[in-house]
Amino acid sequence: MSNIALNVVLIDDDVVLRVVLVDWLRRLGHEVLAFADPLQALAHLPKDTDLVISDISLPNMDGFSVAATVCSMPGNQLPKVLLISGEDHQMRLALCPPSQVIGLMLKPFSFAHFSRILTLLEQTRTRCPGTIESLCPHSRTLPGEPSTAGAPESLCFSARYAGCLHYNAKCGETLRCLVAAPGA
């Protein structure tokens, strides 16, 4: 069971996968709203949504368009978007900043890997990934910050995503790499 329940919106037109994922996410303690149609999901997206999980190949709108629409919504703390697909869309994903799409999980994926991602998302719910030791255990000093020789420092000193000047360049890329690496 998760320590922090996430509010999840799941968008997938595959009814079997949608039912399985909803059941699994709820067993982990997360709140889930599921939709087959992305337009309906976006029209009913709760303000407290933490995560949108969207298939890429959908009727009416693809997953990348879902992500762009979610990221253009007003608000300070937008939900993170995780894309799932049976096809490799890495080249197209590379065009999206990590602040827009945290990553792409290829189907079939393991529930163990998915669980690790959800745990990371729980940890990064209000903090930039660069502040979490298990995500960024390396030593790095940001420009303009003093360095203490030999002392590991956080990659990021931001308290929230909105304040992270380095998110697209490094912090978000770290999270995206972990999403893409099932064996990590």
Image (cartoon, rainbow, N blue to C red):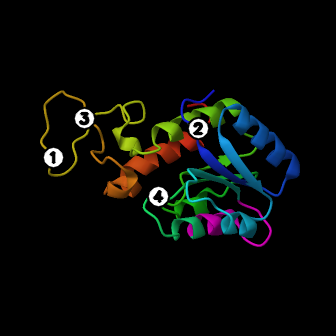
Q: CA distance from mark 1 to mark 2?
A: 35 Å
The residue to which callout 3 is attached is 153
Q: Position of residue 12 (x, y in %)?
A: 77, 55
Query: Rounded to the nearest whole Å, what is the CA distance between mark 3 and mark 2?
Result: 29 Å
**Which residue is at the far right?**
16
Q: Earlier in the sequence, mark 3 or mark 4?
A: 4
From the top left corner, tell me how far across and down residue 133 is, in percent.
36, 31
User: Is 179 in front, or is 132?
Assistant: 132
How far apart in space, not on screen, are marks 3 and 4 (Cα)?
A: 22 Å
Residue at point 70%, 33% (across, down): 111
When asked about the image quadrant of residue 39, the answer is bottom right
**Residue 122 shows in the view:** yes
Q: What's the residue type where badge 1 is placed?
A: Glu
Q: For the residue carrying disc 2, how many other residues have a C-alpha within 10 Å: few (<14), some (14-19), or many (20+)? A: some
The reply to whether the magenta stretch includes residue 127 is no
Neighbours of disc 4 within 10 Å: few (<14), some (14-19), many (20+): many
Kind of residue indicated by mark 4: Ser
Q: Which residue sits at x=48%, y=61%?
A: 97
User: Residue 64: within the magenta?
Assistant: yes
Please tell me which of labels 2 and 4 falls first in the chain: 2
Return the residue at label 2: 5
Judging by the rendered image, the residue that carries numbered circle 4 is 99
Q: At 66% across and 43% down in the image, what residue appears?
A: 31
- The label shown at residue 145 is 1
- Residue 62 vs 121, above or below: the answer is below
Point out which mark residue 44 bears.
none
Q: Position of residue 98 (x, y in %)?
A: 48, 56
Magenta stretch? 56-68
Q: Secondary structure at mark 2?
A: loop
Q: Is residue 83 left or right of residue 71?
A: right
Element class at badge 1: loop
